[in-house]
Amino acid sequence: MIGMITGRLLHREDDHVLVDVHGVGILVHCSERTIQELPERGERVSFYTELVVREDLLMLIGFRTRTERMWHRLLTRVQGVGFKAALAITGTLGTEALLRAVTLEDAAAIRAAPGVGPKLAQRVVTELKDSAAEVMALGAEGEKQAEADAGGERRMDAAAVAATIATGGPDTVDVPGVTGDPVRSGEGAAASAEARREALSALVNLGYAHGEAAGAVAEAMKADGPHQLETLIRAALVQLAPRR
């Protein structure tokens, strides 16, 4: 199966582009968002691809990142979501907003995609809410990972963060590759400070700017009592969600 193509952009339409790959014109279907992010005609482009094969159809779908392709694959596993609906969802929300919507079970955000009704949107968040771990683990491979802070601030492993968000997580969260005691929600102020640092790291790894992530975590920290890491991340995501 064709997993990736690289070539020169020849032509673009609303839903597809034509790419010259060593003299062969390859038609690649993309979301509107992906097409808008492409460079000018004649420039070099690369796509991760998914091949759709049906009795009356042979179509290559292109994605700028592996995360976008993974979300497409996850979405098409949901009953009633075909490749067109999946492209509409990822094209409308983008991968970061889609991850946030699924994590927070925000079906209203999914409904913003053209052709997606309330029942289908609810089915998407219900069936994919546990897939945040899979997507964030992929991001840990480098696609969405932010650069380390100048002060060498410790970062929580993305797969551990994902498991925490997706499953609600235990009160104790081990940080792979880091020595010392794990974060415990019942250890008072010190644990709250540690949870704040780990939540900030998780949000930066999701692609948020350090400043806006820090502000969201600060707002989430205003709640009284000890701060469990998974609760803090969820609350910060709520703060970061676009106001409707």
Image (cartoon, rainbow, N blue to C red):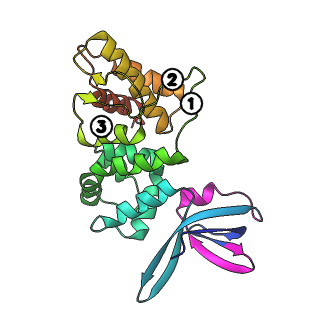
Q: Which residue of the protein is positioned furthest toward the top in this rendering? A: 189
Residue tagged by mark 2? 153
Query: Could you give the CA–CA distance between mark 1 and mark 2, rounded to whole angstroms?
Result: 7 Å
Q: Which residue of the protein is positioned furthest toward the right in this rendering? A: 42
- Which quadrant of the view contains residue 182? top left
Give the image location of residue 243, x and y in percent: 40, 34
Q: What residue type is labelled 2?
A: Glu
- Which quadrant of the view contains residue 9? bottom right
Query: Could you give the CA–CA distance between mark 1 and mark 3, rounded to whole angstroms?
Result: 21 Å
Residue tagged by mark 1? 148
Q: Is residue 40 magenta?
A: yes
Q: What residue type is labelled 1?
A: Ala
Q: Say which of 141 and 6 sits in front.
A: 141
Q: Residue at x 44, y 89 (%)?
A: 56
In the image, residue 177 above or below residue 55:
above
Label 3 neighbourhood size at 10 Å, few (<14), some (14-19), many (20+)?
A: many
Give the image location of residue 212, x and y in percent: 50, 27
Q: What residue type is labelled 3?
A: Thr
Label 2 neighbourhood size at 10 Å, few (<14), some (14-19), many (20+)?
A: few
Please report contact status of discs 1 and 2: CB closer than 8 Å, yes or no: yes
Range of magenta residues:
19-42
Mark nearer the N terminus (1 vs 3): 1
